[in-house]
Amino acid sequence: MRVVIDWSATRLEAALVDGADAVVDRIGTDDGLKHAAGRHEAVLDAVLAPWRQAHGALHILAAGMVGGRSGWMEMGYVAAPAGLADIARAVRHVALANGDRLTLIPGLCDPAATPFPDVMRGEEAQLVGHGLDRDAVVVMPGNNGKWARIGGGRIVGFRTFITGELVLLLLKHSGLAGIATQPEGRDWRAFARGLECAAGTDRHGLLTRLFTARTGWLAGQVAPAEIGDYLRGLLIGWEFIEARNAGWWQPGGTVDIVGDDDRVEDYRRAAERLGLIARVAADDTALRGALAIGAESSILA
Amino acid sequence: MRVVIDWSATRLEAALVDGADAVVDRIGTDDGLKHAAGRHEAVLDAVLAPWRQAHGALHILAAGMVGGRSGWMEMGYVAAPAGLADIARAVRHVALANGDRLTLIPGLCDPAATPFPDVMRGEEAQLVGHGLDRDAVVVMPGNNGKWARIGGGRIVGFRTFITGELVLLLLKHSGLAGIATQPEGRDWRAFARGLECAAGTDRHGLLTRLFTARTGWLAGQVAPAEIGDYLRGLLIGWEFIEARNAGWWQPGGTVDIVGDDDRVEDYRRAAERLGLIARVAADDTALRGALAIGAESSILA
């Protein structure tokens, strides 16, 4: 049986996949990469023990941070443009002491970025799972979110936007942290007002517009419970503006949104407000991509 | 005798000024506004006691956060365009129990900013101290730094850039916090490389360029000890780019840099790299401005 794992700094999520590519079980633990440092193999051995006892030796597929510099085994980056075979050729197969086989999926880099190559880890599996058979512009929300172009069956290129990380930093650690309160549920009106600020014709840029969360509060126009979603709307809207300026989209175009958390809805709303047609992808693209890369690497082997 | 105080969240700095406008003594304590909450008058009474005993009742001038929402007494904002008399008319005189007189200086707002009026507290005193008698574009480095235009003897308008706050957030709390190390002294080469990244012709904006601190490290091109000054150069350079796009300056123009910490040198280097003539102002503008506003308010009274 195959197992696809998503091992982040704080969580280990695993899915058991049968011969028909169906997920038949899931395990999630707090054994994040930080917690497991120095004993990754032992942690994985223990967490997956029930499946190993039931099904025998496992074939574990892993993309993302587990192959990063602060992960388990550092994997290189395949240079874009890259297709499925390019990625599959660069995987690393590791025979584990318990009889399991681990397949680590490499990251992707874009050497066209300046002044340094841009990088992704894990999103390449999402893109493969989303499908490389149709030309598309894909946005992948995240702390270090990506815009990627798919064409001719390959990932042509991509760029990172640190939008999600800035939202967290501003809400948790900036001068707004002592003002903003957490509402119950999302405040879509505040989010829309943030989008309007990003889309507006003010000639000033992000460093000035971000101050409007505070001036709006000082003016009594943005309540403490509205600050979070106002900032999300402003920063995500601004990501779209920067992406437009860089040639990723034009009004009337289409963008595919690939992700698995509630930021997908944020990006859908931003895209529609700015005149883009938004196609929301399935939420299991990372798993589908890891399976596809694993299968291709077996064919190539 | 007059006393000019600078009361921030974490510090209380006071300067004793004689009849010839010369500073004859200074006191600094850790009695910040947060620490003094609810007992501001008692704290001020105690800290200034030596001067009161030596010189009798004091006339205390205060601009900035002491008049903010989380300060001692909330002061309003005078709307730009505003000159010395406009600011002086809006001060508040408070007779303290110990016989001292406190003069609180209002903030300034710019109602032309969208979607909410921009605000400053303290920088209006710096601008007055720098001088309103000469038309100029003034940049004031800070966590919430300002660009201001002086013309016709008035502060015509201004905008805030949260550059300084973002530098701190990224270095202290982002994914870079665990990578960056603190060098001895400044690394002007790394700062210049950050400036180059901001000034470069990449079509992508700030949300993408900020990721280059990480990709530069991953590529072995930005060392951990270089990350801080690389980020400072990038963000300050980008502030200048945004300010240019918004019409604050053109290549070959002149900008006055007003501040009292080592960020003044950062801004001078950024200005010169980008083709601006930088004039560095005296570092006691806040004190000179508070004295001038206090004197004008006495004339008007």
Image (cartoon, coloured by chain):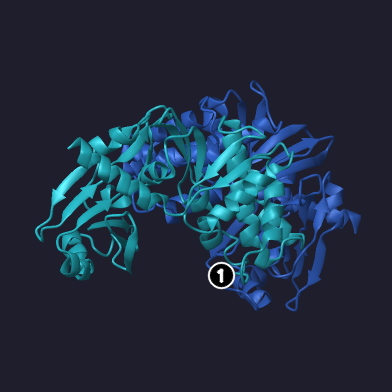
Chain colours: A cyan, B blue
Q: SS class of the residue under badge 1?
A: loop
| Amino acid on which the number 1 mark rests in the picture | Asp
**Residue that protrudes farthest toward the right in the picture:** B301
x then y, percent, for residue A7: 31, 58
Q: Is residue B198 left or right of residue A254?
A: left
A117 with respect to B49 (left or right):
left
Q: Residues within 10 Å of mark 1 (few under 14, many from 20)?
A: many
Q: Tell how many labels.
A: 1
A35, B103: nearer the viewer: A35
Q: Position of residue A214 (x, y in %)?
A: 67, 57
Identify the residue at image location x=15%, y=63%: A56
Residue A216: x and y in percent read: 72, 57
Is residue B6 in sight in this rendering? no
Instruction: Specify the quadrant that holds the C terminus of chain A.
Output: top left
On what subunit does the disc labeled 1 rest?
B
Q: Quadrant of residue A241?
A: top right
Above or below for B79 versus A37:
above
Q: Position of residue B117 (x, y in %)?
A: 77, 51
Can residue A277 be seen in this snapshot? yes
Taking the spot 54% from the left edge, 55% from the top edge, the residue there is A263
The residue at the point 64 percent across, 67 percent down is: B51
Q: Is residue B230 above or below residue A95?
A: above
The residue singled out by tag 1 in the image is: B31
* Residue under the point 24% across and 63% down: A36
A179 and A162: which is toward the camera: A162
Which quadrant holds the N terminus of chain A? bottom left
Position of A2 with respect to B222 (left or right) is: left
The quadrant in which residue B247 appears is: top right
